[in-house]
Amino acid sequence: MCGIVGYLGGRNAYPILIKGLQRLEYRGYDSAGVALINDNGNLVIYKTKGKVEDLIRVSRDQDVSGTVGIAHTRWATHGEPSDVNSHPHFSENQNLALIHNGIIENYQSLKTELSRKGYHFRSDTDTEVVIQLIQYLMDSQGISLEEAVPMALQHVVGAYALAILDKNHPERMIAARKGSPLVVGIGENEFFVGSDASPIIEYTNKVVYIGEEQIVFLEKGKEMRITDLRSVEQTAEIRELEMSLSQIEKGGYPHFMLKEIFEQPQTLLASMQGRLHPELGVVKLSGFIDNRKRLLSAKRIVICACGTSWHAGLIGKYLIEELAHIPVEVEYSSEFRYRKPVLFPTDIVVAISQSGETADTLAAIQLAREAGAFLFGICNVVGSSIARATDTGCYTHIGPEIGVASTKAFTAQVATLSLIALSFAEQLNTISESRRQELVSELQRIPEKIAKILGHDEKIRDLAKTFTYARNCLYLGRGYNYPVALEGALKLKEISYIHAEGYPAAEMKHGPIALIDEEMPVVVIAPKRGNYEKILSNIQEIKARKGRIVSIVTEGDTDVAKLSDWSFEIPDTEDCFEPILSIIPLQLLAYHIAIAKGRNVDQPRNLAKSVTVE
Ligand code: M6R
């Protein structure tokens, strides 16, 4: 939701912090700020509504010296985006400064209590109470910052990743986490703090992922120290980053989203590498093999996810039910966590999340854990909260996804679910060996088929110009392509702000058909296999009402193409792998329409990449 970054060492902190904020801007971008203890020993804060570039403008003629600092890029939750609500926040005496990602749920009662004691609040944020509470504990109990932080955090209800500076101790920084991610990078006599490793990778590949309810004490010239909230010492597990700098840069593309769409032939290969063995006709997933007995005894699978990951989960249901004959339910994590779902210890709960930090999905798996279910995670971000909170799982291994609109994560999630379905099918003997061999070989061919579709980018760009007028758009698909219709519509609405709905094509006549007229673009995903004849009839129904049809068809199919105003071909493949191909033109279509409308595709309004608040 927000991005936090910190530096403590021998270099000038400001440029490191600014670059770090630019790397984290995908997490939120409605305001930005920085706090430094400058060379004169002053604790200074520069902050503003707007993006990191606005912060650079605001701090241009200011003293940005100093070798210790913290910085923040915000996605507003409490209090509108404004200069005063931007982070960092000072404590009452302005000796302490704090940045925060998360939500303090009991902020109102803490604020009322602290206001009564004479503390003044400048902002409408929930965050400011934390730094005021820390100062209050220091003042009233005569204790140090090191003692006050754990004490304060025991009073706080909610989620946080935070970092604090103390004007009186410019050689120190304290950071803590509960529910929101926090990484510390260890350099030569220097420390870096980040919401993820992207602001750190340029300087060091040695990192520590801070655990739940842990506080980290950093001091120049000393080893880092970690405790829990009760001040019990914890061990720091130093890990090596696998990420590279080029993965978090645009590499010549105008936007991260376009780069990530075009990366899909490689990312798909990466997510299947070492797992898919076409020569043997088998799949080897270590997370599956190591827990084989437990997984195979499952009576039911429940998939929990949000947004694009939920759409991938729906395809996972179709795959697992068809290939492995295990009943699967797909749940929105946000609904699942608050209703009273019936769960059994024999269930497997699969959490799908690119970021591995989505608050609702994390809460859903906590609920499933209490019910005794076995937890399987499909995450992209290594070391993320969901990856750590599950019993086992698979990483998608696609490198950082930075564009807010998820693209390469979706195709990798579907590929991973295909591998899981094939693993179950092999072990449970639900499909023949020859059929499995066919599917495994076909899956291996998917990356080159994606590359072929990407070759039609220009055609899609030209069509996109035609659709900038549209205010509404319908996406229709059947079977495996119904979730693709949902995902195509989500892509369009989130980056172009055109209202779009995805529907199972046959549901159209139960309501949405009323919307169709000569103004209405209808995108129909109609490959040759599956319910081809049925979808042909649906297209006829749209045609009869003068809808403007854009179709996704199998190479060489002229029947649907003839009925359509525009059509895009995708290579033929097995029904169950069609979504990985049919989504590609829809990602490109959404991207080009958004560009033609002048939208900021990497940072669409009101959104953030990682939804760490509910
Ligand atoms: O990190 P996650 O996969 O858990 O995120 C889930 C959704 O927030 C995410 O897919 C969101 O819907 C994207 N903006 C879709 O493009």
Image: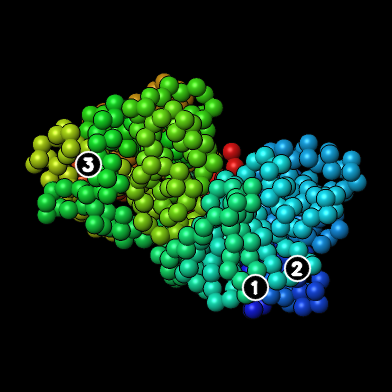
> How far apart, in angstroms, are the residues tagged by discs 3 and 2?
56 Å
Q: Which comes before the other along the chain, label 3 or label 2?
A: 2
Q: Indicate the secondary structure of the residue bearing disc 2.
A: loop
Marks 1/2 in contact by CB < 8 Å: the verdict is no
- Image-based side of 56 in relation to 279, left or right: right
Q: Position of residue 314 (x, y in %)?
A: 36, 35
What's under tag 2, amino acid-wise? His
Q: Which comes before the other along the chain, label 3 or label 1?
A: 1
Q: Which comes before the other along the chain, label 1 or label 2?
A: 2
- Image-based side of 319 in relation to 343, left or right: left
Q: Taking the image as drawn, is residue 489 in sight?
A: no
Colour setup of the view: rainbow
For the point 41% across and 24% down, the residue is 343
What's under tag 3, amino acid-wise? Ser
Q: Taking the image as drawn, is residue 421 in sight?
A: yes
Query: In this view, which residue lies farthest toward the left?
Result: 434
Would you say the beta carbon of the disc 1 residue lies within 8 angstroms of ligand 1? no
> How far apart, in angstroms, are the residues tagged by discs 3 and 1?
50 Å
Marks 3/2 in contact by CB < 8 Å: the verdict is no
Q: Position of residue 558 (x, y in %)?
A: 22, 43
Q: Indicate the secondary structure of the residue bearing disc 3.
A: helix
What's under tag 1, amino acid-wise? Lys
User: If the image is split into quadrants, where does the C terminus sit?
Assistant: top right
Tell me, for residue 339, which label it has, or none: none
> How far apart, in angstroms, are the residues tagged by discs 1 and 2?
10 Å
Mark 3 vs mark 2: in front: 2
Would you say the beta carbon of the disc 2 residue lies within 8 angstroms of ligand 1? no
Mark 3 vs mark 1: in front: 1
Tell me, for residue 169, which label it has, or none: 2
Instruction: From the image, tell me which residue sits under label 3.
Output: 423
Instruction: From the image, tell me which residue sits under label 1.
Output: 220
Q: Is residue 597 above or below residue 481?
A: below
